[in-house]
Amino acid sequence: MSTWDLRDVPDQQGRRVVVTGASSGLGLVVARELAKRGARVVMAVRDVAKAGRHRAELLSEHRAATVDVLPLDLLDPASIREFAAAVTAEPVDALLNVAGIAGTPLRHNAQGWESQFATNHLGHFALTTLLLDALDRGWEPRVVTVASAVYRYGKLDLDGADHLTGGRRYSPMRAYARSKLANMLFGLELDRRLRATSSPVRSVLAHPGMASTPMNTNRCHTLLDHLIAPVATVVARAPEDAALPILYAATVPELEGGTFVGPHTEFRGPMRVTRRPVRPPADDRDLAERLWAVSEELTGMRSAMLSRAC
């Protein structure tokens, strides 16, 4: 695949796009670039004040842009429901599940779920389920789930509870890899279920590579983090480059559902977005189906539209 940069992002006039995590990092870059190209962007964020400042800056530079800021806390099921109720009166053309946390100390939400698994997977699972009907009414609609190549190191034992609680011997990076494996399994299973219903919605996955963003700089400061930080600063991509696979997944018209895209190399250098193979354990369809069932049970979210495919 040839080099693809911001100049190649197609016109988005008339499209309504929801971007989670849009107050900083990759989510902010993606929201800004889509708004500049005519999309009606909904910034779904925890920090409304911060996102409001970014919105004001964007509108001062691009007066024709249309950007809304709405609160969304992916750790809070009630917040997810309130957000969905606020945006689903109109069709949604794209849902970009960009928000994420990485390598954080062990924390739990009010339901007792480990924060990385709850934010990166369960929160987005619930949000996507609630927005599917609005997406089904959209124009060339798609769901983009931001994954990571570290999914290959993730282990997901659904017979135990470590994925949900963090386990007795919690490892921040093992928990992150587990959540990213869940993202891959979810995005691929979502596409299979959408195809079975003949829905126009496509589910695609994007890996940004190593990015210099707050999510990576605010990680749990272990000894290993301190040792690799100087190297990471040198090799990590700027957010504007790392956001390109997400923008590609969100905007290229001919991209098929079930596609996984990312940089041809993980580290800093010319960005060439390429289609990447899905490797074990993300290709385990039985595990994907079990994760789907567990996610439905935990979140209480079940799509009537997708149930027709079962």
Image (cartoon, rainbow, N blue to C red):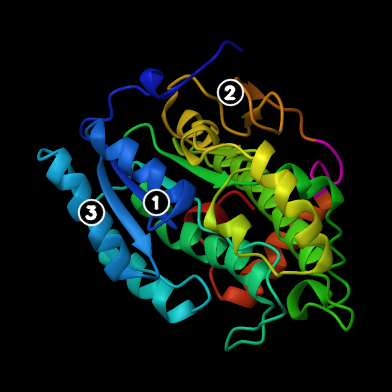
In whole angstroms, how far apart are the C-alphas of marks 1 and 3?
Answer: 13 Å
Q: Are marks 2 and 1 in contact (CB under 8 Å)?
A: no
Going from the N terminus, do you reach mark 2 or mark 1 first?
1
Residue tagged 2: 271
Q: Nearer the viewer, mark 2 or mark 1?
A: 2
- In this rendering, does residue 136 appear at all? no
**Residue 75 appears at what percent x and percent y?**
53, 76
- Position of the N terminus, as image quadrant, is top right
Q: Which mark is residue 19?
A: 1
**Where residue 167 sits: x, y (%)?**
84, 80
Query: Considering only vertical position in the picture, is 163 above or below 37?
Result: below
For the point 83% across and 36% down, which residue is it?
279
Assign a secondary structure to mark 1.
strand
What label sits on residue 121 in the rendered view?
none
Quarter residue 16 falls in? top left
Q: The residue tagged with tag 2: helix, strand or loop?
A: loop
Q: Amino acid at mark 2?
A: Met
